[in-house]
Image (spheres, rainbow, N blue to C red):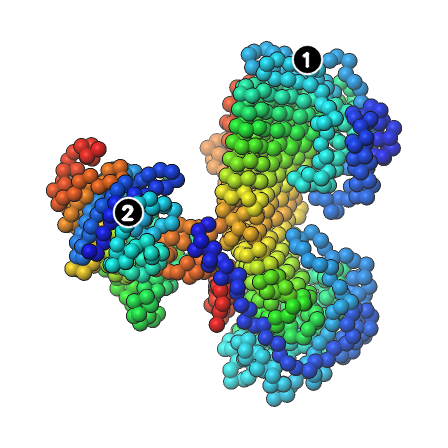
Amino acid sequence: MFLEIKDLSVKIENKNILKSLNLNINKGEVHAIMGPNGSGKSTLANVLAGKEDYEILNGRINFKDNNLFDLNIEERAQEGMFLAFQYPVEIPGVNITPFLHSAINSKRKRMSEEEIDNLSFAKLLKSKASDLGINIDMLKRSVNTGFSGGEKKRYEILQMSILNPDLAILDETDSGLDIDALKIVTDGVNKLKTKDNSFLIITHYQKLLDYIKPDYVHVMVNGSIVKSGGYEIAAEIEKDGFQKFQ
Amino acid sequence: MNSETLNTLNSYSKNKYKYGFVTEIDDEKPKKGLNEDTIKFISLKKNEPEWMLDWRLKAYSKWKKMKEPKWANLSFPEIDYQDIYYYSAPKGFEKKPKDLSEVDPKLIETYNKLGIPLEEQKVLAGVAVDVVFDSVSVATTYKGELEKLGIIFCSIGEAIQKHPDLIKKYLGSVIPPGDHSFSALNSAVFTDGSFVYIPESVKCPMELSTYFRINAENTGQFERTLIIADKGSYVSYLEGCTAPKRDDNQLHAANVELIALEDAEIKYSTVQNWYPGDEDGKGGIYNFVTKRGLCAGKNSKISWTQVETGSAITWKYPSCILKGDNSIGEFYSVAITNNFQQADTGTKMTHIGKNTKSKIISKGISLGKSQNTYRGEVSFLRKADKARNYTQCDSLLVGNQCGAHTVPYIDSKNNSAVIEHEASTSKINEDQLYYCRQRGLSHEEAVSLIVNGFCKQVLQELPMEFAVEAQKLVSISLEGSVG
Amino acid sequence: MNIQDNYLKNKKNIFFSENKDIQTHREKLINIFENDRFDKKNNESLKNINLKNFIDFNYKYLIPEETSVINNNHENSYSIVSVNGQCSSFKDDKIEITKILDEDYNDFSKNDTIENNDHFVNLNSLFLNSGFKIVIKKNNNIKIRISNIITDDDLTIFQKNNYICEDGSSLNLIEEYENKNNSTSNILNVIKLEKNSQINHFLIQDNSPNHNLIITTHSSCKKDSTYIQKVYNFSEGYVRNFHYSELIEANSEADLQGIFFLKDNNTSNNKTFVKHLAEDCKSNQVYKGILKDRSKATYFSNTHVDQVAQKTEGYQLSKGILLSDNASYFSKPELKIYADDVKCSHGSTIGPIDENAIFYLRSRGMSKIAATKILISSFINEELNSIDNEQMSEIIQKKLVRYLSKVK
Ligand SMILES: Nc1ncnc2c1ncn2[C@@H]1O[C@H](COP(=O)(O)OP(=O)(O)O)[C@@H](O)[C@H]1O
Ligand SMILES: [Mg+2]
């Protein structure tokens, strides 16, 4: 099994957020999680990425034959886990290019691969950026600083395509995007998709799933997955909302 | 704070000072202590004219009546001025060597280790360097090329001999010897330092740089630098400093005076990396520095940039007196303190002329058990119509045993002048750390990256050649051991 | 007359002169004065003060003939007329008003929030001749309005008031200082907020040119309590507003705000100081000043965050508008921070009225004076709008109009 979440219960500040959650993802699969606001979708994404504020009450997570809880944030990232944040943080003064360059090299180091030099990296970055319709000028700016909502999301996808993760978690990457931007973002995902990597796509709306066809759709309500199935569930939700799952 | 953050912080405090070696070299010193004989000894060694000795003695008699300024947020034991050597020169430096073949190879080796090669074939491209070892200037590179443009770049000792008119006119004109006890002390016993004169309309084509090294034990370093930019000229000057690791505290009390005449611009950058003492707060340099620039002429500009990572104690306020109409003063500062370091640094912008402008960007980072204070004064005098100041000072706290303090004094006596001041203090943003680590950067790398980003506004003001160095220095100041 | 002679001569009129401990302490204070001699150079809080009035004064105090009045006009609402700093005793099931006693004497010379050298606090301790103590009993919700009346010229009032808000109580306190004689009041308020209590403290200051007012507050906040202070200084005489707050238990809050309007040769010295000594506390220090003619003001603000005071939020703002070439404003917004998990900031702007805004308003047909007045009002808009007491809002508006009528 590629990613296996078993009986996961998570608490933050005396509040139980995730409750006995189960989820399995195999290599090459695209999973979507849909759920109302506050149901715990971002919490799940953050727990997977290793954010430290949460208290794990119960359960386990295996990722690529590792007990995920044995790895810290950066080790998970270096092992191929990528989280496109719902709200990417601004880091003033830190230039995008060297930032991503260090990121890719720390991953390569862990994989005992050769580090990529300045020049080849700059080339790689430029070509990926133009694929995603990102202006080269943007690469001179500081990480997320002063970016519009849409720019931030596009920049998350750029990082994803550079780091080429085994498991990419997209937390509401579609929200705040207009149709053109949505197209660019989903193209990015579809290009990256192979039989060896997997996606966990968190979304509110069916729209995104029209562009990235998921193999499975899960409905999350109140910290648990209440229903799983195929693409048809998304259509159901689009029509009737989450009401009937609650 | 989580345990991981704590581990990273602990490793930071084990920071190694890589410039801490001592050069074994014979040196020549007068008796310890400060009295008229010491001053006469220095003056004699420097072969100074009578008027210079008189000037020193006058300053000394002022000093005797003065007390150290005590308002800074610093605590340190009483300085025993009688337990310090006021002059130390490597043997054989009665006269400054004509070329490097006359310089002790050990010295050249020292500077190679410090990354400042002196040999012709290796000199730093585009940077002319004056090198001061303890009390004397040992070498000045690119001298000939500068002379062709009429630029004078030499040790202050040499300038006293060769350019007495300029010295008489300007020395002490910005920092009067009686200003406070450290300026009086420096005026009495200053040993060496640099002198720069840029003639009218000349744009100095390369960075001028002085490198200060304290080597001898129990020795104070009292350098004096004087830079004069004549009408319409431009110069960029950079100062670097290191000292060996010693368990005793050593005193450094420099005075730097800048004068910018009409339409002239002086850019003065400092990368201060004196020995900060060890993890237990033992040893390190006491750095009491007075730096002041006078924008004497219309449309002149003086810009101070400093990266302060060293010294056990830093007491330093590079200032601008904005006298000429439309003149501009700038101050960009990064101060990082770790372990038991204490820094009280900032600036003073005095707006006298009309339409004068000043800008202050200060970034303080405190780690370990250190105390880091920004202290700044912006004043608009009555005649400073339409003067403007913008001040931004931000402090970052890394760890919960250190202190970050902001003490701005804002004084306006003119109703058309505008002062804007912003300051903030916070810890390193956990969300930023999380974001960087999610991309695979280690905790330590992430901290270093974020801190460098925090300092960017200042670092980008440094001359290109040094910006990269400074960035590394910032990382080193944060990091654990550095090979 | 010098301080020592003054004290010795008038000792019998001064509170607690028989108490040995207090006597010893006062002798120490005299020594401090002797040694320091009000050294202006090393004590920035003395900047711009005409010290002669305060060191070399003629001590004079009159015990009021007409006693003060306490009215319980509405339920939970009291009005007090304090005469020469005195107030008669009163008691019901909600509040208790008494004279201050020996035990209420504080040794502030050793308090490190109020700096050692706050000579005016020391003078208050030395010459104490009036004052009262008000206790708000548990879980009561009270309004008090105090008019501070001084009956004669040349009086030197040294007054100390203690306020205690017991657990769960709240106090809405309006104090008015409107005196037209040549007296000097030196008032020290010591305010204790017990758990979960709240005080909204308004000070309206509007004295005549020769009346000096020195007012110092020391408030301390226990768990979940909130102290809000708003100072409105329209005085034509000297006013010194120094207000210190200590947040001594978790989740407490101090909000110290002030606006001042100066003209002619008047001076005002202002200081706020919040010391965070516990976790999860908030503080706010905001002063705004408008200065015309030859007036001068200083404002010192200080947020001190102790090592234990994690999760502190502290904000400071200092703003000044100079309406004349000869006015001056000195501001020193200080942060002293020893804890790392904090969010503290300060902002400060000093300058003229925005010329672009004036231009804009004039292009809409407004006269320059009208435009200036509008912009001054908008400068303090927030402060004015936040007054939720209609009667008070009216009083303040009137005083503002009076000040603005002199703006040219
Ligand atoms: N740091 C936190 N502290 C307290 N509650 C939190 C925190 N983060 C999230 N929550 C709460 O957890 C619940 C789930 O949040 P989240 O995972 O962001 O939901 P979703 O992404 O599905 O909208 C919400 O009720 C939210 O308020
Ligand atoms: Mg979410």
Question: Which x, y percent locates residue B19?
Answer: 56, 72
Label 1 close to label 2 by CB (< 8 Å) = no
Q: Residue at x 58, y 82 (%)?
A: B108
List the residue tagged with mark 2.
A59
Chain bearing mark 1: C
Q: Residue at x 14, y 44 (%)?
A: A229
Label 1 secondary element = strand
Quadrant of the displayed image that contains ligand 1: top left
Label 2 secondary element = strand
Q: State how far apart marks 1 and 2 are (Cα).
A: 71 Å
Chain bearing mark 2: A
Which image quadrant: the C terminus of chain C?
A: top right
Q: Residue at x 74, y 72 (%)?
A: B85
Residue B32 in view, yes or no: yes
Question: Which x, y percent locates residue B157?
Answer: 70, 76
Residue A189 in view, yes or no: no
